[in-house]
Amino acid sequence: MKRSLLLILCAMLLLLTACSAAQKPAAEPTEATKDEAVITSARPEDNAEVMLPHYRYTLNGSHEVKGRQGVCSEGDYYWVSGSTTLAKYDKDWNLIKINEDPFKGYEIEVNHIADIDVYQNELYIGAEYFMDGVGKNIQVAVYDGDTLELKRTFPFEPESGQLECSGIAVNPDNGTVWMCSWVGEESGRYLYSYDLKTGKYNGKVHMQMPPQWLQGIAYYNGCFYMTADDGTADDKEPDHLYRTQIKDGATDCIVTLERTFDDVTLQGEIEGLTFDHDKNQLLLLYNRGARIVLGMPKGFYDGYDHEISEVFAYDMAARS
């Protein structure tokens, strides 16, 4: 009898303990476990490192330049491209040299230079024939950084599906050259890769959440940064900077919003970009004053009788 009573009491005690444990709320995850979940998740939307901006950008000033398309930086110099010009500046933005007839030496007709890049004192340029939103005769061209004259061109791959070239970037880490397209639909959803030494076409990478109306591309610290003319100037909407990282062998990449440019002089047309490694700055080319229709200037806004091209310098600080 005593033994049976003891067994009953033990069973009741075990039952009460189990109920208490079931009613106790689960422990809140610690910051360490949260960080671990973010880092180890295969989904980009769960990864703060992927989805949040990498830097904070503080406007330092602006400089008016001769050229409305692109900008690049290396060593003690800056270069600026216009639709039909190439210009070289020192680090105080004093004009050193300008080439106002840069299309000598092409075997096919071109009339437009896009955003540019520089590597080992050679300018990499996306040249094409562009008219009213349509591009053809795309060329990957290399110019001398001192004379601003054409040196050679890459054989463009028409089977890539690229219909226009709005920007070009060199990735020195793996010896590649990348182009982006302003034209939308399929052409504008990809980035196109060529071998830096041979000019051979490597293939294209599909952007997930692709920006609209890409205008420039630059490579910096393992990532590609792209400008997009996705704000409507007539409605005073700002344009944006985007970021992506392309892993070796990848066929697609996630695109993230990096910066909204609501602090420029006047909302107009964003263009190319580059990074000044020595000054730790983002340099952004922006045009104001002209009305742009299908990529072509068509008259001016009130108060302007000509278009103004400016390079805005942004100091960069890594986000903690």
Image: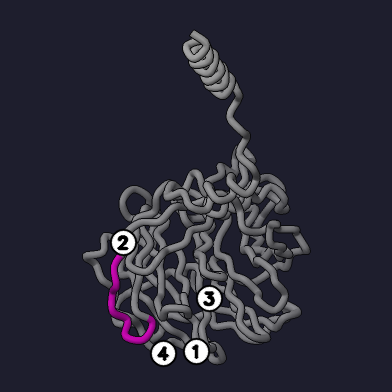
Mark 3 neighbour density, 10 Å: few (under 14) some (14–19) many (20 or more)? many
Question: What residue span does the magenta drawing correspond to?
Answer: 196-203
Q: Secondary structure at mark 2?
A: loop
Asked if disc 3 and disc 4 are in contact, CB closer than 8 Å, the reply is no
Residue at the location (41% across, 75% down)? 177
Asked if disc 1 and disc 4 are in contact, CB closer than 8 Å, the reply is yes
Q: Can you tell which of label 2 and label 3 is closer to the viewer?
A: 2
Looking at the picture, which amino acid does disc 4 mark? Lys
Which of marks 2 and 1 precedes in the sequence? 1
Q: Secondary structure at mark 3?
A: loop
In whole angstroms, how far apart are the C-alphas of marks 3 and 4? 16 Å
Looking at the picture, which amino acid does disc 3 mark? Thr
Which of marks 4 and 1 precedes in the sequence? 1
Looking at the picture, which amino acid does disc 2 mark? Gln
Name the outermost residue toward the front. 1
Which of marks 4 and 2 precedes in the sequence? 4
Residue at the location (35% across, 83% down)? 153
Any mark on residue 144, and which?
A: 1
Q: Can you tell which of label 1 and label 3 is closer to the viewer?
A: 1
In whole angstroms, how far apart are the C-alphas of marks 1 and 3? 14 Å
Mark 4 neighbour density, 10 Å: few (under 14) some (14–19) many (20 or more)? few
Asked if disc 1 and disc 2 are in contact, CB closer than 8 Å, the reply is no
Q: Can you tell which of label 3 and label 4 is closer to the viewer?
A: 4
Q: Quarter of the image for the C terminus: give it.
A: bottom right
Question: Mark 3 highlights which residue?
Answer: 85
Asked if disc 1 and disc 3 are in contact, CB closer than 8 Å, the reply is no
Asked if disc 2 and disc 3 are in contact, CB closer than 8 Å, the reply is no
In the foreground, 57 or 71: 57
